[in-house]
Image (tube, coloured by chain):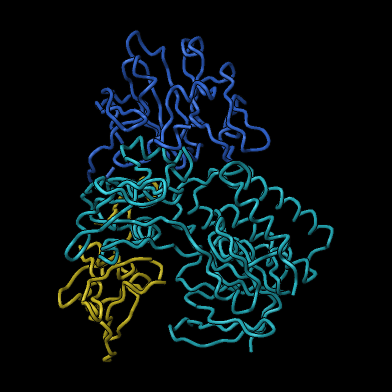
């Protein structure tokens, strides 16, 4: 059995940050990611981030990704790519289906002292007649195709959902050369930031609030979409149907945390809709209800990349402290600064629900 | 349709081409790109047909979670084309329902 | 706020949110308009301005306030804003025309000297415009800034151009 001090599961912004903060203080860190390249969603974020200019605001996600990967390399983080964590077992044993350099696969069991679950979140589906047709896909799939694979998933696109993901991905699809025929939103108001909406409105994209999709039509793939208005009880209003000529329908209806590993290890979870669904609880060190298991990023509440980066740093420092690579004094100071930044990022009308939810998580998290 | 030039990503510098076969037809792909990207760039949107109703399916999640994009690759079924890179002379077939491995 | 329903700001909302420089300031030359009215934790514009004309302070959710007397309209903040919400207007360009500079992250970029269709915040064409300047240097980090000349009376409305047809290379 292999022994590693710290195993980080997931190499997105939160996992990479946790790995870097622990490794640069001397901890032995193994990072496992199921993809061919670490970075998580960051390599698809081609837009400039919001937040504090002192902490990477104004920098594109793709550039933050490159920087983090370089830092991980410099700090000596060991990385297993194309490798999947298939289970967590008693006393922090991590079962990993590892792909070796010759492309053969091997099941490894790694004994860890500390584990960071940074598995992120997955997109919600919206079901409607015809939703299984080729051409209906998650907004994440569409942005992966344009921003990573450099291929258009379609030419005329209907976006479902006007949260930040729906608005930003609509913009990115236009940057790649597609026409976004419209954005529909079931609520009476636009979900994302006004400035994101303004960018796409300026490009002539209509945003239909209080609208839903009734059907996708096509013989072998999407050819048309039927949308209609909804009333104040979210029910479709007959007679308000509009037909849009589209070949692609992208769904941006929220994300839910990927918590299978946390549940497998009996970490306590609560149902918190404001954060995306079932959320594994954590304390102010990002430690779960089970000692030695840490949770960071979207896996413990769907927020943004900049909060994921901070939560990852927090866990990395808390782990370095627990393993005695950093003094209590230093750790306290660093953690306090991170909490100040996290609180700042959760302020304002867009963050308050998350701020409240995260505070409830902290109070609800008691060690088992 | 490929995005050859992009205001933020810049020009596509990948020059190496490989040849793959899709349902008997030869198409060109960029070396190392995901199978789904090569298919999409060549206008192919259907990856498989379902077991009972024989309905077409194509990419949905794009990150290897949903299996809507699986095809038979070099004789092996259920290969997720969104996360599997192309290889020279790869043989790809539309998957019909559940198929058995044949090589 | 109407912004939440229609996805763009009306001039009234901008004026009510103190985003609009005074007519007096407009008549002195280049000046910035920051069309950002919501409390989002974000402050790269404040950090970008070396004349300290943009104030956010703490907490960083404060809506940016422009000091129109300190602002010289240099436009460095245009490409720094992650929301692409900052514009520079020059109402003194000529007797009939004014200039508007805006962030434009699409290809192809317009050619200097070409005539383009200028759009308002709703994406509707409200005027034609002539491309005066196109900046795309490294300091902009891939947010090109385009400057067009339009009839002066259109300056309150025009906030961009209609997307150009794709051509190979650029």
Q: Nearer the viewer, residue A262 or A36?
A: A262
Q: Colour of chain B?
A: yellow
Reply above or below: A231 against A110.
above
Could you tell whether A358 is left or right of C107 in the image? right
Reply above or below: B29 against C98.
below
Q: Is residue C14 visible?
A: yes
Reply above or below: A70 against C49.
below
Could you tell whether A180 is left or right of A367 in the image? left
Q: Where's the N terminus of chain B, which quadrant? A: bottom left
Q: Tell me where residue A165 appears, x and y as whole percent.
A: 44, 51
Q: Nearer the viewer, residue C155 or A69?
A: C155
Q: Where's the C terminus of chain B, which quadrant? A: bottom left
Q: Is residue A316 visible?
A: no
Q: Which chain is cyan?
A: A
Looking at the image, which residue is at 25% across and 52% down? A226
Q: Looking at this rendering, what residue extends furthest in the bottom direction?
A: B103
Q: Tell me where residue A320 appears, x and y as whole percent.
A: 74, 67
């Amino acid at each position: 059995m292999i022994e590693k001090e710290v195993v980080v599961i997931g190499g997105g912004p939160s996992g990479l940050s946790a790995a870097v903060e622990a490794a640069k203080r001397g901890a032995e860190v193994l990072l496992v990611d199921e993809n061919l390249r670490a970075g998580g969603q960051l390599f698809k974020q081609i837009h400039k981030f919001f937040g504090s200019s002192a902490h990477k605001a104004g920098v594109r996600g793709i550039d933050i990704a490159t920087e983090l990967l370089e830092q991980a390399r410099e700090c000596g983080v060991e990385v297993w790519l194309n490798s999947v964590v298939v289970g967590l077992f008693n006393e922090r044993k991590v079962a990993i289906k590892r792909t070796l350099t010759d492309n053969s696969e091997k099941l490894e069991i790694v004994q860890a002292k500390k584990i960071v679950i940074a598995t992120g979140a997955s997109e919600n589906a919206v079901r409607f007649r015809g939703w299984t047709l080729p051409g209906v896909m998650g907004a994440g799939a569409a942005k992966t195709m344009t921003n990573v694979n450099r291929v258009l998933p379609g030419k005329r696109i209907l976006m479902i959902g006007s949260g930040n993901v729906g608005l930003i991905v609509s913009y990115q699809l236009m940057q790649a050369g597609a026409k976004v025929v419209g954005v529909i939103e079931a609520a009476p108001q636009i979900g994302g930031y006004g400035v994101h909406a303004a960018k796409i409105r300026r490009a002539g994209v209509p945003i239909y609030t209080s609208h839903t999709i009734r059907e996708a039509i096509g013989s072998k793939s999407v050819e048309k979409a039927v949308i209609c208005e909804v009333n104040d009880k979210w029910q479709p209003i007959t007679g308000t149907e509009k037909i849009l000529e589209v070949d692609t329908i992208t769904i941006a209806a929220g994300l839910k945390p990927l918590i299978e590993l946390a549940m497998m290890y009996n970490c306590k979870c609560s149902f918190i809709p404001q954060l995306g669904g079932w959320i594994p609880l954590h304390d102010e060190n990002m430690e779960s209800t089970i000692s030695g298991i840490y949770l960071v990023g979207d896996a413990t509440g769907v927020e943004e990349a900049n909060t994921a980066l901070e939560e990852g740093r927090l866990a990395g420092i808390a782990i370095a402290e627990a393993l005695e690579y950093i003094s209590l004094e230093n750790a306290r100071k660093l953690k306090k600064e991170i909490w100040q930044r996290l609180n700042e990022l959760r302020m304002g009308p867009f963050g308050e629900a998350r701020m409240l939810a995260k505070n409830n998580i902290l109070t609800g998290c008691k060690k088992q | 349709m490929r995005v050859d030039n992009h205001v933020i990503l810049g020009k596509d510098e990948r020059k190496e081409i490989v040849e793959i076969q899709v349902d008997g037809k030869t198409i060109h792909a960029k070396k190392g790109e995901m199978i789904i990207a090569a298919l999409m760039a060549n206008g192919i949107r259907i990856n498989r047909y379902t077991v009972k109703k024989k309905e077409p399916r194509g990419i949905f999640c794009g990150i290897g979670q949903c299996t809507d994009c699986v095809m038979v690759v070099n004789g092996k079924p259920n290969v997720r084309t969104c996360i599997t890179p192309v290889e020279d002379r790869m043989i790809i077939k539309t998957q019909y329902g559940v198929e058995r491995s044949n090589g | 706020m109407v912004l939440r329903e229609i996805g763009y700001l009306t001039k009234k909302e901008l004026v009510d949110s103190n985003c609009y420089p005074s007519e007096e300031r407009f008549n002195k030359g280049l000046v910035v308009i920051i069309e950002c009215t919501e409390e989002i934790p974000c402050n790269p514009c404040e950090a970008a301005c070396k004349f300290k004309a943009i104030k956010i302070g703490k907490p960083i959710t404060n809506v940016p306030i422009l000091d129109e007397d300190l602002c010289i309209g240099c436009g460095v903040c245009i490409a720094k804003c992650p929301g692409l919400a900052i514009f520079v207007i020059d109402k003194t360009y000529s007797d009939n025309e004014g200039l508007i500079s805006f962030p434009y992250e699409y290809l192809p970029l317009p050619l200097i000297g070409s005539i383009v269709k200028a759009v308002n915040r709703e994406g509707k064409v409200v005027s034609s415009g002539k491309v005066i300047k196109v900046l795309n240097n490294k300091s902009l980090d891939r947010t090109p800034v385009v400057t067009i000349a339009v009839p002066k009376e259109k300056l309150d409305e025009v906030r961009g151009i209609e997307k150009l047809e794709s051509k190979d290379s650029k």
